[in-house]
Amino acid sequence: MIALSCLPVPGYHGTDMGLAVGRGRRLWIGFALGWALLAACSGGGVETAGGGTTPGQGGGGGKQPGCPAGLSECAGACVPLALDPANCGACGKQCPEGQICSGGLCSVDCLGGTAKCGERCVDPDLDPEHCGGCNQACGGGEVCSAGQCGLQCLGGTVKCAGKCVDTSTDPAHCGGCDLACVEGEVCSAGQCGIDCLGGSTKCGDKCVATDVDPANCGSCGNACGVGDVCSAGKCDLKCSGGTTKCGGKCVNTQADPANCGSCGVVCAPGEVCSTGQCGLECAGGTSKCGGKCVDTEKDPAHCGGCGKACAGDEVCSAEKCGLECVGGSTKCGGKCVDIKADPANCGSCGKACAGGESCSLGACALECVGGTTKCGGKCIDVQLDAANCGSCGKACAGGEVCAAGACQLQCVGGTTKCGGKCVDVQIDPANCGSCGKACAQTEICVAGACKLNCGIKLTNCNGQCVDVQIDPANCGSCGKACAQFEQCEQGKCVLKPLESCLKILQAGQSQGDGKYLIDPNGGSPADAFKVYCDMTTDGGGWTMVVRVSTYDPNIDFNVNGGGWSATQYADIDQVDLDNIQATQDYVSRAYGELPAADVMLRNQLGKAYLYSVRTSTGFLGGKSLRSLVTPGVVDGGSACSAGLVYMGGSPKWDGYDNLVLAGDEAGDTEPARIAIRAGCAGDSESMQIGYYRDGHGAFEVYSQGDHWGTLRSMFVFVR
């Protein structure tokens, strides 16, 4: 490693570490970096007004290897990439004339909660040259803390080398003054390391809280604009999620020692902010860790005890670090929260309530429900909350718990003291059955035992969440299984609709001739429909698809009539199938949806039929009848089956053994949609449906001569 020189600070005289600005693009270093540079350059001296150097302390030469925490090497000098306009965000990246470097970005204005003073961006909360505002310099020996000049550091910060710093995140004073992290390390939860701990995110060489950091809002480098604050990981003009806008930041006034109870109320040295009040001890069930009051049950920087920080990908849940949240909490970012009550994550992660709203039962509202009380921006149970015991802001002292709305040493009313809280171990998922026994994220606490959380619509059956309204293995209740061919509908076992009447017959579910529910596509029973099944003729399994009635004028079954292209006409329950004088035609959905092999024609139902024939060759080929009947008529038809079977004593005329679909006669013009003929294209017919004959006209049902007598209706089945 080469030895690095520390950049001279123009304008520095003796111990005066004020703002130094050179002309043009000369690098400046302000007071905020002065002590870090002195530490890096000890032994090398500091440039004086006369051009010489003051002797360094400790001896050892003119240059130090490496850069101190917070600075980076650029061309042999240690510079702050976040503020240096000559090296803004990266070495050699120079800001244009008139712009400044803010948060490592060149800009006309200062970003990320900093303020523009002269030609640089400063933090008025900590900068002694601009303490609380531009050019408001602190006197000799004073420090700037929480925007106020004084002899001591306030707001939970620590005085280190003339500056007030946060030793939990400052890499130059990590865990204590002068405990600097080495190059490449960051300071997280007061510990130096490669990764950030305690739910913070590594942005450059710092660990930050991206949910409130205006310089890294929501993600690294996403700086909020002028006037904006960072709230719940989003830049906005107002604070949300139960935080309060103080200066350019969103803070929790219940725990922030720099804004305790309200903006600008700074706790004295040695004091902490607990439930919005400064004091020497923490109240409301929190623990004093360093200069802050924290909840060790869920704080990833102090999980289960002060200084016990969780790893970068872990969260703190029920005082234990882990990859998942337990005890009824939900993982949002790097924290475990109660989405039923957290105004920053109300109902789901990242859903922040607006200013003035609170989170009640997972919904943002102006008022609290469910027996809770609105305290600040949260809905809480004042009967059990040690920070608001009996009423808002009434915090129990250290060692006390809140029981039945009163602070006392012991829990009452059947509750148990777990840590600093009174809980019902029969229902508390964080302390289920006993203190510290947390249920998994998918579990709830029932009668002191962790059980699978199935929500409102599902039921826990042997460790599985099922819907007993539709589950055939648990129909209506756990363990109640439906029989074969049954399905579960509204908690009751009913026969499952099969694809056709033939499938019902083959499954042994036939109850004789009548109406049945079928589902030709075999998918969801929601699209099943009712049909008439002939379960007796020629072995049964026939599905009725069309009924042609010459008494019904509403649908045209002539050769070019609209009845043949229909997808459904009339409901089977509304058709008088037993009366051949019925005045209503019928087209079933099965006509166009049911794949089949053969066709049966009958003139009556429910009584001794006079005429009935069927095919036996499978000539439909697994297609629907509609798909073969609707094409234009052609010689020989779209499909033709020889070897017709005449049933039940039906009169058979020699040679009429062919069933033709959508056919015409060769050399003649006598088309029909369904016809019994002497040949597939022969000039001789016996019975036709949807027929036209030159010189005679159109017919819905027609019988040649006395072959089938006078017909007024026909039923068409498929199988």
Image: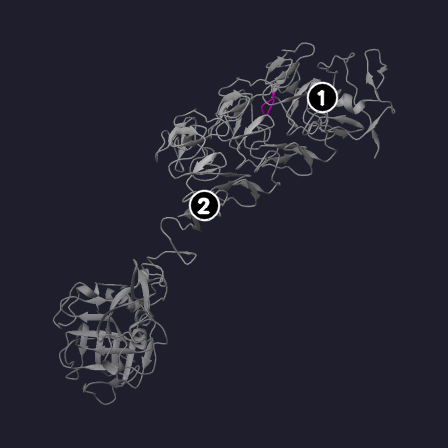
Q: Which residue is mark 1?
A: 33
Tell me, yes or no, whether the highlighted magenta stretch contains residue 111.
yes
Residue 363 lies left or right of residue 581; in this view the side is right
> Where is residue 142, by image quadrant?
top right
**Cα distance in 3D space between marks 1 and 2:** 52 Å
Identify the amino acid type marked 1. Leu
On the rendered image, what quadrant is the N terminus found in? top right
> Which one is nearer the viewer's eye here, 530 or 189?
189
Residue 267 lies left or right of residue 242; in this view the side is right
- What numbered label is drawn on residue 581? none
Tell me, yes or no, whether the highlighted magenta stretch contains residue 389.
no
> In this rendering, does residue 692 appear at all?
no
> Where is residue 393, by image quadrant?
top left
Residue 409 location (% of width, % of height): 45, 31
Residue 298 location (% of width, % of height): 53, 37
Residue 57 lies left or right of residue 363; in this view the side is right
Start-end of magenta stretch: 110-114
The tag earlier along the polypeptide, 1 or 2, is 1
Residue 318 location (% of width, % of height): 52, 41
- What numbered label is drawn on residue 432? 2
**Disc 2: CA contacts within 10 A as few (<14), some (14-19) or many (>=20):** many
Give the main secondary structure, helix, strand or loop, of the magenta stretch: loop
